[in-house]
Image (tube, helix red, strand yellow):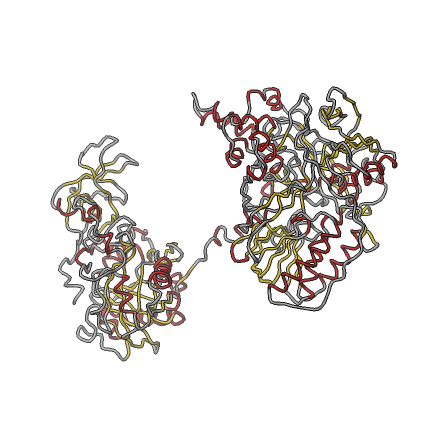
C-alpha cells in the first residue's frame, strides 16, 4: 500500500521512516508517525469521511484543528468505543481503527441522503411544527433519533481510569504558538512560576503549519528550539495534549490532558485522561485565531476546506489535499496558500478573489503563473461524492460564468480571534470593523489576551505582543526582572486586508451552508428572521446554529453577520451568543475522575469496623458509613436476628456502634447565645455537666435536624447531629457565623472522625458501666438522666452521656477514635456476666419506633415541631431563633396538618409498611384522597405484633379510630387503629431508672 497524495518531501511533523498501519471503515491504510487521522486519510486519497447531521450529505475534512465540523469518526471497539471524535485531533498510532458514522447502510450508500431531496419539508424548526400531532412525539422520537445523532455511545463499562490533579502557578499561558512561546519565556525569565499548555502533541502552534521563517530559520525549527529552552527552565511546567476547556472564578482554569489517547490503550498504572485544576495569579490567552469560511452554493462538498488547513496539510504533514486547486478568498492572507500548494507540487489553477483590486499580492501571484480572478466569486461547485469542479462568476456581471476543473477548493473569509476563554471569564467583546471580527474587550484583570487572540495577525506583532503580555503578567503576579527577551527577525507576509463578504452576491442553485456541522443554511436564517426569531439567542436555538460539537467555531460570526443583513442592523447591534465551557468536547470520565463506582464517595468505617466483621455482623452501607445491620447467629435469618437483638436490649443489655452521629465542637464566649439562636428550645438555663435534646429549624420553620448538645464548660458545648445531616448542619452553622451573625464570638469544628461512640442500653447497662468505668460515679445520683461525666475505661479518657435513643436506661460513651476498639472490647468484656450482646442499626430502629422517637423518615423536610409532637419544646418567649417567625404562619399551625401518630394493625399481625398511604375507604379505588402515610413500620418483639409511626391529617385528634393502610404497589389494604406514638414505657420509668 502506498500514499498517493503524500508529497515528495517536507512535512515538519511526520517521520517518513516510521510507517503506521490503520483502518477506516474496515479498509487498511498506511500513514506516518506524526500524522493525524485526517492527514493520513488525505494522504491515502480518502475524501469522503462522513455524512452531515440533518441531510446526510457527503462530507470531507474541512479544517486541520479543533474547529473541525465534518470529520467526526468513531474510534476503537467495545467498551473503549468513542464516538464523534475529530479526525483532525486524533494522533495516528499503529493499529488504529476508525469508522464513519451517521450513515446507513454504508458511507458510500446512505439511504438517509433522501433527506437532502426532501429538504423543502425539513426547514429550520420543522420538528416543532410537524411532530406535535397524532400519533404523538414519543412515536416520532424513536425514528428521529435513529436518523439523526452523531454516533452511538458505548454500552460497556469504560475500562480506563481518569485522574484529577491540582496545581498553582503565577502565570498560566494557554497556547504555544509564536505568542505563547514568547509570553511563557518572558514570564519565566522574570522569575514567575509558569504553566504552558497546548492541545497539540508538540509546542509551536501555527509555526509548525506555516512556511514562515523566524530568525533566519524555518518557523518549525525555531519553535522547537525555543520550546526546548522553555521546558528546561526549572520554574516552567509544560503540558502538551492539554486543552484549556474552561476558565472559572478566581483564576481557576480547567485543563483536560489526553495522557494516553494517542495509544491503543493506556499503559499500566496510567490514566487515559487527566483533569488539571490550575489556580493561576495571571492567565495569558495565546489561543490564536480561527479562519472563517465563505458562504456559496454547495460549499460543503468533500474537497472544500479552509485555506489555512490546506497549508497545514502540505507544510506540517507533507500531504497534498488535492491535485488541482483553486483558492477562493476575500483577503490577501490566503495568497500564501497558493504559494505553499505550488511548492508542494499541487497545480493551483486560479485564485478567485472577491475584491476588485487585490493589489500587489495579486501581481506577484500572476508573475508566478497563477491566474488571479479579481472581482469574482465561486457561484457553484460540482461533483457527487467529492469536488470535481467549480463555476466562477464575476460580481459585476453574474451572467458571466467560467467552469474550472479542480479537486481542491481552499476558502478563506478572514480570521476570528479565539475569544472563548476570554468570555468564560466574563470578558466582553468589541467589534473591529477594520478586521471584520470580534476582539477581546473588557474583562477580568488577571486574564490577558495576546497575539492573534486579540486581533494581532502579523507574525512580528504576535512575537512582540507575547513578550509584552508575558512581562506584564509576571509583573502583576509580583515579579520584576531585567532579563529581557530578544525578538527574532521575521518577514511578515501580505497584510490580511479583508473585504466584507459573508455570502456570495450571485444567484445559484444549491444550498448555502452557514453552519456546516448542523446543516444550517442561509435559507434557514432567512426563515427564522421572517418568523420573528431576530434575537441572536433565539436564532441559535431555533436553527441550531452553533450548537454542534464544534460550537459554531467556523459559523458563529458569519451567522451573526448574515442575521444583521436580514435585520438591516450592524453586527455589533445584533450581538453575540454566550460562549460557555467546555471549549471543545470533554469526556465525562475526565470530569468525574476516579469518583466512580465504589470510589464515588469515600467508604467510611468506624473504629470498631473490624470487630463487627470478626463477630459476624451483616454490614450495611448507610449514607457514607458502613454499619452493622445485625449479628445473625448460626441458622438465624436477619429478621430473626433483629427481633432477638431488640428483645434482648429490653430484657438485659446491648451495645450499638453510634460513631456515625455527627459531632460538632462549639466553643466561644457567645456559645450559649449562639445555641439559643440556632435551636428552637432554650439553652441559657443548661448547667455545665448536663445535656439537652435540641430541635433545629430551617428559616421556613420546618425541622432541619435534631440531636443532643452537652455543656462541657461555661464556653464549650458538644453537639451531636443525625448521621445523614452531619455535614449539612456544620455548613448551616458556619453560614450563620460568617454571614448572618459575624459578630458572634464562636468557633465550630467537626469532630465526628475524632470520637468513636457506642450506646450501652438496657436494664443492666448501669451494672456494666460501673464495672468498666474508672474514676466516675455512674449511679443514678452521680450520673442522672441527661447528665455528662468524664471517666476512664481501660485507662482511656472517655466522655459518658446518660442519654437514650431506645427508651431504656442507656449511656453513650465517646472515646478517642484510635482507642475506640479497646473501649468497646472492654465494655463487652465487662458485660459478659450480664449477658451483653452487640446489636445493629435495624434493632436500634425497632427500639426507637417502640419509644416513638422521630428520625429521618419523620423529619423529611416538611414537618414542624408541632407535627412531630414536639411543639412544647419550642421556646416562644425567646426573642429570636432561626425559623421562629415563619413557624408562626397559619399554614404551619393548622390543626389539619399531617401530625405524628402510632398505628397498630386491627388483626394484630398484618405488616404496616413504610410509605403506605392512609385512607378511609376499606376498598379504595384510584384516585382517592390520601390522609397521610406510614413513615416507619416495624415488628415489635416487646409487644409481639407490628407497629408503625405515621403522619396523619389531624394527628391524635383521631386517636382510637380505625384507618386503612393502603399499599398502591400491590393493592393491599390493612385496617389499623390510631394510637399514641409512644408504644413502650410512655411514662419514662425505664429511662429514668
Q: Quadrant of the C terminus?
A: bottom left
Instruction: Give percent across and percent down for residue 63.
Output: 69, 39
In front of the other: 558 or 121:
558
Residue at (13, 60) in percent of width and height: 987
Q: Please give left or right for residue 921 compared with residue 453 in the image.
A: left
Q: Position of residue 659 (x, y in %)?
A: 35, 64
Residue lying furthest bottom: 775
For the residue pair 829 and 427, the one nearer the viewer reads as 427
Numbered-mark total: 0
When asked about the image quadrant of residue 511, the answer is: top right
Q: Is residue 917 visible?
A: yes
Image location (x, y in percent) of residue 132: 44, 24
Decide: is 777 above or below 253. Answer: below
Single out the residue that lies furthest toward the left.
960
Image-based side of 985 in relation to 575, left or right: left
Query: Which picture quadrant has residue 412?
Result: top right
Quadrant assignment for the N terminus = top right
> Is residue 262 at all visible to an observer of this figure?
no
Q: Position of residue 896 (x, y in %)?
A: 17, 43
Give the vertical position of 530 relative to 569 (above or below): above
> Quarter of the image holding residue 914?
top left
Quick check: 640 above or below 752? above
Horizontal relation, residue 939 to residue 151: left or right: left
Q: Residue at x 28, y 50 (%)?
A: 857
Most foreground residue, 604 or 377: 377
Amino acid at each position: 500500500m502506498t500514499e498517493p497524495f503524500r508529497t515528495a518531501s517536507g512535512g515538519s511533523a511526520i517521520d517518513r521512516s516510521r510507517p503506521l498501519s490503520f483502518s477506516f471503515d474496515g479498509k487498511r491504510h498506511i500513514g506516518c508517525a506524526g500524522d493525524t487521522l485526517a492527514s493520513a486519510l488525505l494522504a491515502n486519497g480518502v475524501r469522503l469521511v462522513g455524512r452531515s447531521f440533518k441531510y446526510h450529505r457527503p462530507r470531507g475534512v474541512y479544517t486541520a484543528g479543533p474547529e473541525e465540523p465534518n470529520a467526526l469518526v468513531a474510534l476503537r471497539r467495545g467498551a473503549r468505543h468513542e464516538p464523534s471524535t475529530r479526525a483532525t485531533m486524533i494522533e495516528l498510532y499503529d493499529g488504529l481503527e476508525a469508522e464513519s458514522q451517521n450513515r446507513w447502510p454504508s458511507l458510500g450508500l446512505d439511504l438517509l441522503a433522501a433527506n437532502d431531496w426532501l429538504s423543502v419539508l425539513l426547514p429550520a424548526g420543522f420538528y416543532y411544527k410537524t411532530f406535535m400531532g397524532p400519533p404523538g412525539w414519543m412515536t416520532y422520537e424513536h425514528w428521529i433519533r435513529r436518523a439523526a445523532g452523531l454516533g452511538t455511545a458505548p454500552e460497556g463499562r469504560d475500562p480506563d481510569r481518569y485522574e484529577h490533579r491540582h496545581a498553582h502557578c503565577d502565570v498560566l499561558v494557554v497556547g504555544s504558538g509564536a505568542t505563547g512561546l514568547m509570553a511563557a519565556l518572558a514570564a519565566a525569565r522574570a522569575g514567575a512560576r509558569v504553566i504552558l499548555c497546548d492541545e497539540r502533541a508538540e509546542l509551536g502552534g501555527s509555526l509548525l503549519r506555516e512556511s514562515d521563517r523566524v530568525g533566519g530559520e524555518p518557523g518549525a525549527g525555531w519553535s522547537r528550539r525555543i520550546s526546548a529552552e522553555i521546558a528546561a527552565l526549572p520554574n516552567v511546567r509544560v503540558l502538551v495534549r492539554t486543552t484549556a476547556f474552561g476558565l472559572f472564578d478566581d483564576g481557576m482554569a480547567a485543563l483536560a490532558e489526553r495522557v494516553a489517547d494517542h495509544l491503543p490503550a493506556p499503559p499500566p498504572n496510567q490514566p487515559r485522561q487527566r483533569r488539571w485544576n490550575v489556580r493561576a495569579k495571571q492567565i495569558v490567552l495565546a489561543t490564536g485565531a480561527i479562519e472563517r469560511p465563505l458562504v456559496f452554493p454547495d460549499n460543503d462538498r468533500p474537497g472544500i476546506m479552509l485555506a489555512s488547513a490546506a497549508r497545514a496539510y502540505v507544510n506540517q504533514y507533507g500531504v497534498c489535499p488535492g491535485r488541482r486547486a483553486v483558492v477562493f478568498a476575500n483577503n490577501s492572507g490566503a495568497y500564501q496558500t497558493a504559494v505553499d500548494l505550488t511548492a508542494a507540487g499541487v497545480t493551483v489553477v486560479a485564485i478567485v478573489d472577491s475584491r476588485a483590486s487585490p493589489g500587489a499580492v495579486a501581481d506577484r501571484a500572476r508573475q508566478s503563473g497563477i491566474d488571479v480572478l479579481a472581482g469574482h466569486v465561486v457561484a457553484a461547485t460540482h461533483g457527487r461524492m467529492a469536488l470535481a469542479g467549480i463555476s466562477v462568476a464575476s460580481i459585476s456581471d453574474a451572467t458571466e460564468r467560467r467552469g474550472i476543473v479542480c479537486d481542491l477548493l481552499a476558502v478563506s473569509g478572514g480570521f476570528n480571534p479565539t475569544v472563548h476563554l476570554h468570555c468564560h471569564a466574563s470578558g466582553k467583546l468589541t467589534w473591529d470593523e477594520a478586521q471584520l471580527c470580534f476582539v477581546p474587550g473588557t474583562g477580568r484583570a488577571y486574564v490577558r489576551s495576546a497575539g492573534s487572540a486579540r486581533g494581532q495577525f502579523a507574525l512580528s506583532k504576535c512575537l512582540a505582543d507575547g513578550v509584552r503580555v508575558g512581562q506584564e503578567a509576571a509583573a502583576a503576579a509580583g515579579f520584576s526582572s531585567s532579563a529581557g527577551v530578544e525578538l527574532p527577525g521575521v518577514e511578515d507576509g501580505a497584510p490580511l486586508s479583508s473585504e466584507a463578504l459573508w455570502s456570495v452576491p450571485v444567484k445559484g442553485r444549491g444550498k448555502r451552508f452557514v453552519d456546516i456541522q448542523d446543516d444550517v443554511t442561509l435559507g434557514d436564517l432567512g426563515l427564522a428572521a421572517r418568523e420573528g426569531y431576530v434575537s441572536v439567542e433565539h436564532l441559535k436555538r431555533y436553527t441550531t446554529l452553533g450548537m454542534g460539537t464544534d460550537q459554531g467555531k467556523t459559523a458563529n460570526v458569519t451567522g451573526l453577520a448574515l442575521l444583521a443583513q436580514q435585520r438591516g442592523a450592524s453586527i455589533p447591534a445584533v450581538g453575540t451568543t454566550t460562549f460557555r465551557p467546555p471549549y471543545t468536547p470533554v469526556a465525562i470520565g475526565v470530569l468525574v475522575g476516579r469518583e466512580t463506582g465504589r470510589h464515588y464517595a469515600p467508604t467510611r468505617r468506624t473504629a470498631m469496623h473490624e470487630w463487627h466483621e470478626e463477630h459476624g455482623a451483616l454490614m450495611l452501607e448507610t449514607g457514607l458509613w458502613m454499619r452493622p445491620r445485625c449479628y445473625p447467629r448460626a441458622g438465624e435469618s436477619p429478621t430473626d436476628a433483629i427481633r432477638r437483638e431488640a428483645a434482648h436490649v429490653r430484657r438485659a443489655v446491648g451495645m450499638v456502634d453510634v460513631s456515625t452521629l455527627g459531632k460538632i465542637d462549639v466553643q466561644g464566649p457567645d456559645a450559649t447565645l449562639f445555641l439559643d439562636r440556632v435551636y428552637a428550645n432554650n439553652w441559657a438555663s443548661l448547667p455545665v455537666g448536663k445535656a439537652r435534646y435540641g430541635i433545629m429549624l430551617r428559616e421556613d420553620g420546618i425541622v432541619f435536624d435534631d440531636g443532643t448538645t452537652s455543656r462541657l464548660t461555661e464556653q464549650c458545648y458538644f453537639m451531636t447531629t443525625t448521621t445523614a445531616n452531619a455535614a449539612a448542619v456544620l455548613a448551616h452553622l458556619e453560614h450563620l457565623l460568617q454571614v448572618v451573625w459575624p459578630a458572634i464570638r464562636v468557633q465550630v469544628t467537626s469532630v465526628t472522625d475524632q470520637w468513636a461512640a457506642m450506646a450501652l442500653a438496657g436494664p443492666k447497662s448501669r451494672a456494666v458501666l460501673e464495672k468498666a468505668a474508672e474514676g466516675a460515679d455512674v449511679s443514678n445520683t452521680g450520673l442522672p438522666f441527661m447528665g455528662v461525666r468524664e471517666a476512664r475505661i481501660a485507662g482511656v479518657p472517655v466522655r459518658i452521656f446518660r442519654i437514650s435513643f431506645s427508651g431504656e436506661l442507656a449511656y453513650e460513651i465517646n472515646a478517642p477514635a484510635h482507642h475506640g476498639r479497646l473501649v468497646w472490647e472492654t465494655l463487652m468484656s465487662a458485660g459478659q456476666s450480664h449477658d451483653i450482646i452487640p446489636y445493629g442499626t435495624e434493632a436500634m430502629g425497632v427500639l426507637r419506633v417502640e419509644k416513638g422517637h422521630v428520625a429521618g423518615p419523620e423529619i423529611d423536610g416538611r414537618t414542624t415541631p408541632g407535627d412531630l409532637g414536639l411543639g412544647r419544646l419550642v421556646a416562644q418567649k425567646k426573642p429570636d431563633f432561626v425559623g421562629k417567625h415563619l413557624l408562626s404562619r397559619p399554614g404551619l399551625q393548622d390543626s389539619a396538618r399531617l401530625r405524628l401518630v402510632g398505628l397498630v394493625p386491627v388483626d394484630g399481625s398484618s405488616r404496616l409498611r413504610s410509605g403506605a398511604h392512609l385512607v378511609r375507604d376499606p376498598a379504595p379505588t384510584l384516585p382517592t384522597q390520601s390522609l397521610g402515610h406510614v413513615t416507619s413500620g416495624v415488628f415489635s418483639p416487646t409487644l409481639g405484633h407490628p407497629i408503625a409511626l405515621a403522619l396523619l391529617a389531624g394527628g391524635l385528634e383521631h386517636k382510637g379510630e380505625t384507618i386503612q393502610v393502603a399499599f398502591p404497589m400491590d393493592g393491599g389494604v390493612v385496617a389499623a387503629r390510631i394510637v399514641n406514638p409512644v408504644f413502650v414505657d410512655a411514662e419514662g420509668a425505664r429511662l429514668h431508672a
